[in-house]
Image (spheres, rainbow, N blue to C red):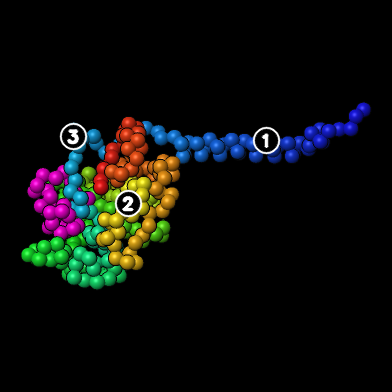
Amino acid sequence: MGTPSPADTVSPRRRLRRYVLGALAVALVLVAGYSFGYEPPYRGTLVERPPRPLIFAHRGFGDHGPDNSLYAVEHALRAGMDGVDVDGQLTRDGEVVIFHDLSVDRLTSGVGRVRDKTRDEMLTLDLGPKYDPTIRGAYVRTFEDFVSTVRGHGILMVELKVPGLAATGIERRAVDIIRRYDAYRDVVLSSFNPLVLYRVKRLDPRVRTAFIFMDTNWNPKLLAEIKPGDQVDLPWMVRQEFVRRALRKVVRPDLLSINQEVDHAVIDRLVAKGWPVFIWK
């Protein structure tokens, strides 16, 4: 009789371990392929198909009034806009105010960051004079003020600005206000930060959310608006479509807010899958 080969001496336990590891490797490949490579058809139910494309006023009609002001939003609605998109931030004392920049310097006569100011301090800031010296009284207003004004007259899309990963409480405050006004059909909460959208859905799955994304980081126009020290880079991962494909499966947004410079093949593919999309520049 010959000498047993190494294969003949493998113990049943070691053979089982190899089978298990092999099965796990196959499972990981399948999960990764589904997560990063497959785009399933859109199955959301909270966004109704409009009979025509809807037109939104960017930054609340920021080209025709003070940026992110209720003054501009009221003008947009009177002009027949279907909705407005604005930006929400949390104050030091936990109120959501509508304001674009992380610091107030560029748009008002004040100085400092929104997160370091109280609600009352923010509401004393006038957005009018920096836009047009003849405009007075276009004060910063709260998210609640915007909801009560826009409700029943159009759609309010609010980007919740949360640069970091940690929860700040902005999601709970925003959801509480939507519940109070029964504004589920009037408001969409959006964010570049997928964790924000995930937390919103955990708080109330009836609130409509939009995942904002772009393929690039900052462009010269946007950089010109940023105060030194306020720049928050968009992570590499969320600028990659294969990663966003996986994030959409986890976060389950109701629509997508897409920069117009995103690869048109990507946009066309998402539209073909049934996604409601909001295109911005």
**Residue 157 falls inside the magenta stretch:** no
Graded by Cα atoms within 10 Å as few (under 14), some (14 to 19) or many (20 or more), the crowding at tag 3 reads: few
Write down the residue under mark 1. Answer: 19
Q: Earlier in the sequence, mark 2 or mark 1?
A: 1
Residue 259 in sight = yes
Side (left or right) of 98 relative to 64: right
Observer-nearest residue: 90 or 32? 32
- What range is drawn magenta here? 61-85
**Residue 47: x %, y % from top left:** 26, 39
Proximity of marks 3 and 1: CB atoms separated by less than 8 Å:
no
Proximity of marks 2 and 3: CB atoms separated by less than 8 Å:
no
Q: What's under tag 3, amino acid-wise?
A: Arg
**Residue 1: x %, y % from top left:** 92, 27
Side (left or right) of 184 relative to 134: right
Proximity of marks 2 and 1: CB atoms separated by less than 8 Å:
no
Secondary element type, mark 1: helix
Tell me: residue 229, above or below residue 189: below
Observer-nearest residue: 41 or 265? 265
Residue 206 got which mark? none
Observer-nearest residue: 15 or 103? 103
Question: What is the C-alpha distance between the residues marked 2 and 1?
Answer: 43 Å
Question: What is the C-alpha distance between the residues marked 2 and 3?
Answer: 25 Å
Residue positioned 41% across, 35% down in the render:
39
Q: What's under tag 1, amino acid-wise?
A: Tyr
Graded by Cα atoms within 10 Å as few (under 14), some (14 to 19) or many (20 or more), the crowding at tag 1 reads: few
Q: What's under tag 2, amino acid-wise?
A: Ser
**Residue 230: x %, y % from top left:** 33, 64
Residue positioned 46% across, 36% down in the render:
37
Write down the residue under mark 3. Answer: 52
Write down the residue under mark 2. Answer: 191
Residue positioned 34% across, 61% down in the render:
231
